[in-house]
Image (cartoon, coloured by chain):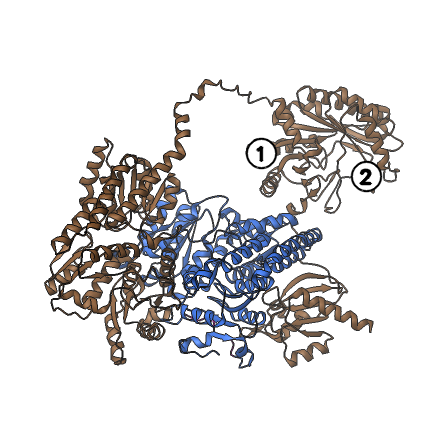
Chain colours: A blue, B brown
Amino acid sequence: MVRRQSILEERKKSIIDKASFCRGDGSGISCGKSSVSGAVSQRACMFSGARVVLNPITDAYHIIHGPIGCASYTWDIRGSLTSGSDTFRTSYSTDLRETDVIFGGEKKLEAAIDELVAQESAKLIFVYGTCIVGVIGDDIDAVCRRAEEKHGIRVIPVKASGFSGTKSQGYKLACDAIMQLVEPYKNIPKVKGINILGDFNLAGEMWIIKSYMKKLGIPVVSTVTGDASCESLLRMPSAQLNIVQCAGSSTYLATRMEEELGIPFIKVSFFGAEDTTNSLIRIAQALGDEAAVRKAVAFTTEEAEAAEAFLQAYRPKFEGKKAAIYVGGGFKAISLIKQFNEMGIETVVVGTQTGKEEDYEIIEHLVNENTVILDDANPSELEEFMLEKGANILVGGVKERPLAYKLGIAFCDHNHERKHALAGFEGIRNFTREVNLSINSPVWEYCR
Amino acid sequence: MGANLKSLNVNPCKMCMPMGAVSAFAGIKNCMSILHGSQGCATYIRRHMATHYNEPVDIASSSLTEHGTVFGGRENLLKGLENLIKLYNPQIIGVATTCLAETIGEDVPAIIREFYDTHPESTVKIVSVASAGYGGTQYEGFNRALWSVVSQADMDPTPNGYMNIVTPMLSPADCRLLKNLLDSMGLKYVLLPDLSENLDGVHVERYERLKGGGTSLADISKMAGARHTIELSLFNGDKFSPGKYLEERYGVPLTKMALPVGIRDTDAFIDTLAALGGARPEALVTERGRYIDAMIDNHKYCADGRAAIFGEPDFVYSMTRLCCENGTVPVIAATGSVCPALKAALEDEVRRAADRALTEGGVVLDDCDFDLLENHAKALGVNLMIGSSDGRRTARRLGVDIVRCAFPIHDRVGGQRIKTLCYEGSLNILDQVANDLLAKKEEGFREELYDRYFDKEQQAAPVAPAQDIPSIPDMLKKTETHPCFNCSGGKYARIHLPIAPKCNIQCNYCVRKYDCPNESRPGVTTSVLAPEEAVERYVAAKSKIPNLSVVGIAGPGDALANFDETRETLRRIRALDPDVTFCLSTNGLLLPLYAQELIDLGVSHITVTVNAVDPEIGAKIYKHIDYMGTRFTGLAAASILLANQLSGLRYLTSRGIICKVNTVLLRGINDTHIEEVVKKVKELGAYISNIMQLIPVKGSAFENLELVSNREIMAIREKCAPELRQMYHCRQCRADAVGTLDEDQSLSFRSPCKSAGARSVTKTKKYAVASKSGSLVDQHFGHAREFYIYESDGAAVRFIEKRLVKNYCNGKEDCFEDKKPAMDSILSAVSDCGYVLALRIGDAPARKLQSLGIEVISTYDRIEDAVLKAAAGQQKKEIC
């Protein structure tokens, strides 16, 4: 365990480096717990977890039931692209005021749904209950049920009071909401094809993955939730196989579908050449589709070679560089470490907001001896360890970017607001270019 | 609230109180804020601010959980205060409550007292502000935080000759402008808050978590002894006005005035400062002169502007007046806050600006969302927006630009450096307004004038083709996209709907059968569909195969022998899709009867199978025909069939229907007769001829007929080619084929479908991999909830399936003990495997596996690599 003056006592169990981990005290990393009060966690809340997973459903109406803040800060927050409706980019909130809090917000919510149905002919509405709704006791289940009966559309409650759980628990709420949506379609006949789970079509990444599936001759039944529509989600139960890209948010959904709909799933990753190659081949194999396996092998061999040639030109520029990673989920951190390895960059600090014990175990195996691993890190810890370990670049979210810059460290945006694709073979090029343009920018020569 | 939706805020034009409170605290020296509530509030606000200011923004949270919500957050807040003091060592802490803390009724002052009681050594000043998110917007939160600071800080009322300047939320650059002005006038002052440094820091060698800028506690204490307070806000009310508090409590005179934006209000501010003893340096006079010069230079461009201004009340007030001074009509002045006073303050101003331009007046709105703003903007005609980047989606839909000069700006850099105050800031805004309008004119005037003045009607309107008769180009186009009529149609897909089971003739080479998914030839289908099922299948296929251009009816029997179904199916599909090409194939027996009806149904392509044009030969090919209730055999049968085929064909082709003639090549029967067939159908107007190989079918009369070689068929086709176009790419499809000719997808549209991964057990030894991630061997054997099963020959690795341990529980209720799977189930999940690959494995299970003849490999590796290595190692062993 790391012992330093500016690390809070309660936080010490959530910070390890490999040397201490291997000492064999067996305690592992402390993770998946509530954030420590006053520690300035980088995490969001249960509501945000549910919101980010469901928000990309393009033709759904997302009503935030609560005071305005939660709607204001999550309005159009993801860079999810759509090939159809734009509805999801509009913010709807009941904007509860003092009197609503005193007298209850159910009536306002009910009226809101009625108006939305009348004016916009909404077919699918998600109603998110935020902190206050959980406290003042609005029965949003009942409101939604009544609205469904009255209007003959789907109105699905997502009870996501921020205090009642972590962001990962919010992901589960979103998955449950999706299952509730497809419930009546559970027994539709199976067709040839797969569902892609846990990709949110940031910068068109879902489209990239779908184009790969097309190359392999594998039909895509439904995408969850990147560029999804209500109608496309309803077809979800007819797929033969689920592939799970963002394991943190969607494994739970895949597991439920495996148990309740008999659709097996495999986890995949499209970050980096290694993961993309393995994933494409494994998908074809899992379907028992020989032709697709052959196509996958041919396609990935060609693309991986091209990517390798591309990387080769950049590797001398990355010699001796070190990376720090602080991202949302464990699976992404793992992919990034591997990707940095492919680039010849050593990862010296790695942390996640919502990683699980198993994720950290894998991370431990992937990194070198002295790498620091953190769960739910705060700015002070990131600052301390990035400086101590001499990180040259930080991969993280918007909040971490200014910190890196203040410390004179390059930065790569690997968050849901980005506007360039990082998945697939295209993503390798974008990622490598981005790392290079920041890590080798001339500005560092003038500010040190 | 919204324009159409009274109970919903649609696209908010405001944020919440805690956002304002922490923004104000950012302007206090060595101050750290903590939000008392759940974790998300702090994170979202940090993200919102970090993107605008491009600065690290650290805000702590008491991270309330379910427990804290039910039993009170006292413990959390006390712990939070201790922790943030350890990490940041601030001199002052701002505790802002959130919706949650206010609703569960937290007594924050009491918790702060308890903190002091239990930490007597602490010198930190803790200020609390009640800022429920539903109590107001960031505008009120900001003001309330300042009031809390002033009313809770220790004050020194000794007169000190200072001036107090209190502001609403400003950009750091504006704070610097304000300070420069006050300094240049030689005034001693306390600026509250001073946002100039903390949210727009410089790059320094050593990073400090608290940046050291902002109004210090010492300066704040001086505010009680100041000689005057100027509060640059007209709409913050009296209740939470810091100036009002200082006036009532300490007798410091208060002047409330607008922000120094535009010529009038900047002049007024400077005049007031001068009256209070400030000097007027020469530079200031020059600056004013330059601003007026710019107003004159820009006025004609600005006069084109119809602006929608949105944001906090003080900002909207100031920008509206700046527009009015420059001839831009403020068509909409809108704030998201509840602020009826704004309307009273601006109404006259806005009306006069409209009168001057002889245009209709604008609207002043409070409690407004972007939906409402957009509605008004569309109705009133807006060509410019002034405010934050939250208006960008509206701006995009309106096709206008935003002059970005308010918080938050998330789609551009430099939010922290935007200047709006005094002559310099006003000039910046004025130039941007003029430039946006100039850019709009420059980009659009050519098209606009062309559209307005050029007479496009002068050109004669093209004559529209008649709708009901398919034109020849139409038919040819359809033919181009028909895979069976055109070789290059291969990229288009067709669907054969198996709705016609019955046949009215018996050919000697044919056996119709069903339930044979793996045989691909005419007459075969897995199942026969009712018309409604056929329509469903079409819809399903169309949604998955966008290039599906053709619907065909190809049996398994004869389309016309099942005419009710054929008619019903085609009619229903036509109702859904007016464009799709209809084709069908027939033996032609009933063609004279139904030809016209087929045309009426919109069938454009028809294939007739004509194997002979000589009844003598035909009699050898057809066993019998069923016609008009009678079964005919021999020559009679062949004659009737032929007569009907030929007259039907002529009828169709003479009415523009594209006909293909299929001919099955039968050695020793019609092989020397083919040229004659082709010649005859050519005469009758056939478009293409398709000479096909016989597929010998078990059980048919021609089961043992010797086949014609492909080379012979090619020779015959080439011989006939000068006579009539030949089809070289026939695949002799199934009656339920779907897809392009090269890629049949009919399996995916049949049901039920075989599930993925199901596969018979092979003799090859299997590798069971314990994996959590699915890409690495990274799971303890004893913790495995699933195994990835692989096969390998040492050269290649093949994934077979994933097994869930709990499916091997043998019905035991206690399969999972303490959330871990029971060892018995794990063992039975891998019992048929030769090898187990796991990250680690206990001694006991390892021995158990060995006793079952299963080899254990502990490793950490990519799955594929690990299996490959294990397999290679195994082979080596076997060779040795």
Q: Chain of mark 1?
A: B
Residue situated in front as seen by the camera: B671 or B570: B671
Q: Residues within 10 Å of mark 1 (few under 14, many from 20)?
A: some
Quarter in which the C terminus of chain A is drawn: bottom left
The image shows residue A54 at horizontal and vertical percentages of 46, 54
* Residue under pointer 1: B572
The image shows residue A70 at horizontal and vertical percentages of 36, 57
Q: Residues within 10 Å of mark 2 (few under 14, many from 20)?
A: some
Q: Are marks 2 and 1 on the same chain?
A: yes
In the figure, is residue B95 to the left or right of B392? left
**In whole angstroms, how far apart are the C-alphas of marks 2 and 1?**
34 Å
Q: Which residues are magenta?
A: A27-34
Q: Nearer the viewer, mark 2 or mark 1?
A: 2
The image shows residue B336 at horizontal and vertical percentages of 28, 49
Quadrant in the picture for residue A257: bottom right
Residue situated in front as seen by the camera: B513 or B201: B201
- What amino acid type should be assigned to the residue bearing mark 1? Arg
Relative height, residue A127 to residue A385 (above, below): above
Badge 1 element: helix
In the image, farthest residue toward the left: B251
Quadrant in the picture for residue B676: top right
The image shows residue B236 at horizontal and vertical percentages of 20, 55
- What amino acid type should be assigned to the residue bearing mark 2? Ile
* Residue under pointer 2: B695
Q: Which residue is rendered at x = 25% and y = 81% of the image? A: B120
In the image, farthest residue toward the front: B282
The answer to whether residue A303 is magenta is no
Q: Chain of mark 2?
A: B
Asked whether residue B519 is in view, the answer is yes
